[in-house]
Image (spheres, rainbow, N blue to C red):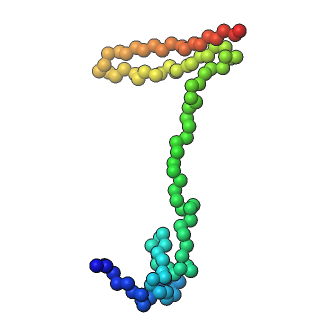
């Protein structure tokens, strides 16, 4: 059994213009308004959010330039936290990374 009556002789009032339309000729818009067929508008594609993609951050398989010769990497001086008063003194040493290339 149907939940609603067919209403083939019923009328409805447009939410946009206030004009009277046959209820069977009215359409519901994306924003919930019930309007006549001549007033109906589809949702504009600009209102749909774009899928967020992460920005590329690093190169895949990076290699140093062989023409530049030596490559030095400085990691900074203060990479270890200072020792707390309760813990024993902590000493850390970081060296240099060196890449030597041979020019042919």
- Residue at position x 55%, y 73% from top? 41
- Residue at position x 31%, y 19% from top? 87
Q: Is residue 97 above or below residue 11?
A: above
Give whichever of 97, 26 is nearer the camera: 26
Residue 67 placement, left or right of 73: right
- Residue at position x 59%, y 13% from top? 99
Residue 6 placement, left or right of 64: left
Q: Is residue 79 above or below residue 37?
A: above
Q: How many marks?
A: 0
- Residue at position x 53%, y 83% from top? 17
Residue 91 drawn at (x, y percent): 40, 14
Toward which corner of the image does residue 92 lie, by quadrant? top left
Toward which corner of the image does residue 61 lie, by quadrant? top right
User: Can residue 20 be seen from the camera position used here?
Assistant: yes
Residue 71 placement, left or right of 24: right
Residue farthest along the bottom direction in this orientation: 9
On-image quarter of the C terminus: top right
Residue 25 drawn at (x, y percent): 49, 82
Q: Is residue 84 above or below residue 17?
A: above
Give whichever of 32, 1 is nearer the camera: 1
Residue 10 drawn at (x, y percent): 42, 89
On-image quarter of the N terminus: bottom left
Residue farthest along the front direction in this orientation: 1
Residue 58 drawn at (x, y percent): 56, 32
């Amino acid at each position: 059994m149907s939940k609603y009556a067919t209403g083939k002789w019923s009328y409805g009032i447009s939410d946009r213009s206030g004009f009277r339309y046959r209820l069977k000729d009215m359409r519901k818009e994306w924003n919930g308004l019930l309007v006549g067929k001549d007033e109906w508008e589809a949702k504009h594609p600009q209102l749909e959010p774009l899928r967020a993609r992460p920005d590329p951050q690093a190169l895949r398989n990076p290699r140093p330039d062989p023409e530049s010769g030596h490559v030095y990497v400085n990691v900074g001086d203060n990479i270890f936290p200072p020792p707390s008063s309760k813990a024993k003194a902590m000493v850390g040493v970081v060296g240099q990374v060196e890449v030597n290339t041979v020019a042919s």
